[in-house]
Each structure stands twice: as structure tokens, then as C-alpha cells.
Image (cartoon, rainbow, N blue to C red):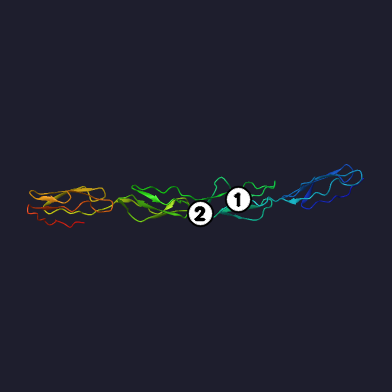
Amino acid sequence: ISCGNPGTPRNSKILSHDGLVFSRSITYTCRDGYYSNGLLTRHCTVNGSWTGSMPECTVIMCGDPGVPANGLRLGSDFTYNSTVSFQCAPGFTMDADRASTLVCTKDRTWNGTKPQCKAIVCTAPPPIPNGQVVGTDFTWGNSVSYACNQGYQLSLPTMITCQGNGTWNGEKPQCFPVFCGDPGVPAQGRREDRGFTYLSSVSFSCSPPLVLVGSARRYCQYDGIWSGTQPSCIDHSGRPLILDQHSY
């Protein structure tokens, strides 16, 4: 009893067969890139027909792997052995533990999962003595500035910007003590000082028999102004003598 030629399904090939008569069988296999959910072996029966139905080989599809948030996918072919790749939008970086390219495998799954795009965040800006950072958004493209504590002033106005590589771009300023200027020296008097900057003090005295009128000690204040009043040396008649140099 012959069952006749059962034919060959599309996208398949015959793997083995031992004849077309009763009790013989034929086995198919799908070509690369195709799969079958049904039986791939048929047997010739006593009534001259083949068991089952002609196998169907369907193209292997992995399905849409998706698009990462804040990123994009390159490639729209999701069939066997095809690849798709991913990129992150500016200001975002890809997870290091996930591949940027996926391949569709023969078991109809991708060889990984789509990556995640995380916002690029710079580390905390470098601190400066006697000052602080102004701004709290350290993500890519954002800028922060610096401000000095009371009694100090910036060496230069500065904004630093978070770059795409996670580092800050811009010059870090310094905070210098406020300068009060030279307070001068009373005529026929003396001055002792340790500088003219914030928190510095100067003291004045007069040569005998002259008498000091005004502040014997003055302090450089946070606003750049000396405390107290400008001293002068007077004689017993009460007439002040002219300052040796201009008072700031």
C-alpha cells in the first residue's frame, strides 16, 4: 500500500524518509528562521494516507522589544537573527549592565532586555572655604553658582554647568575677606594694625601730650566699613590736628 508523495511544506526540508508505503515515515525540519508548532513526522497508514496534516513552518518573530523611556530604538525587523539597537536621549546614559544591541534568537525571544536610560547627574559641586553652593539641580545641562558667607566676597562671578560626562564645567571661585581700605593715621599719632580685611582691627594712639578723640580701636566689618569713628589727636586747646593721610 503506497501513501504517495506527501510533498514538502514551504520553508522546510525533508530531514529523513524511508519510503512511501505502509509503516514508513517522513520527517521534516523547518529552515533557519522558521519554526513549527505541529508534528514534523508523518506515517503512512494501512489505508494509504499520511497521518496528521502538512506541517506549517512560520517565520520566527521575537515581538517588539519596546523603546526605553528617554531613549530610542533603531531597527524595526523583529525576525530571527535580526538586531535592534538603542540610544539614550541627550542628558541620559544607558545602564552599564545591559547591552545596547539585542538579537532575535531561534527560541523566539531576544537575547536580553531593552536597556534603561538614566538621567546624567553630576556629583556634588566642589565646596569652597567661607562659601556655599547655590542650586540643587545637579542633572546634565543645569548650572549652579556660589555665594560667600557674610564678610567675604567672590573672587569672580561664576556659574558651573553639569556636562554630559558627569563632570562640572567652569572655574571654581574663591571667597576672599571683604577689604575695608586704609583707615588712615591721626596727625601726630600712631596706628597698629594686622591688615584691613574683614575681622581685622586697628588701634590708634597719640604722642604725648596730645589726647585721642574718637575710636581707639576700629574693626573691619562685613560690609567693608570700619566700626566706630575716625580718631584724631588734639592738644589741650581742643584743636584737632590734620590726618596724615586720607580716611577711607
- Which residue is nearer to you in this view: 206 or 153? 206
Three-letter amino acid code at the position of disc 2 = Gly
Mark 2 residue crowding within 10 angstroms, few (<14) / some (14–19) / many (20+): some
Split into 4 quadrants, where in the image is the N terminus? top right
Between tags 2 and 1, which lies in front?
A: 2
Q: CA distance from mark 2 to mark 1?
A: 20 Å
Label 2, secondary structure: give it: loop
Q: Which mark is residue 74?
A: none
Where residue 71 sits: x, y (%)?
A: 57, 54
Residue at label 1?
101
Residue 232 % position (x, y): 14, 53
Q: Position of residue 108 (x, y in %)?
A: 69, 48
Asked whether, in this view, residue 181 is left or right of residue 169, the answer is left
Left or right: residue 15 versus residue 178 is right
Is residue 222 or residue 24 the one in the foreground?
222
Is disc 1 placed on a helix, strand or loop? strand
The percent position of residue 248, horizontal first and vertical second, equals 21, 56
**Earlier-in-chain disc, 2 versus 1:** 2
- Indicate the amino acid at tag 1: Thr
Q: Is residue 232 left or right of residue 98?
A: left
For disc 2, the marked residue is 91
Determine the residue positioned at 45% across, 54% down. Answer: 142
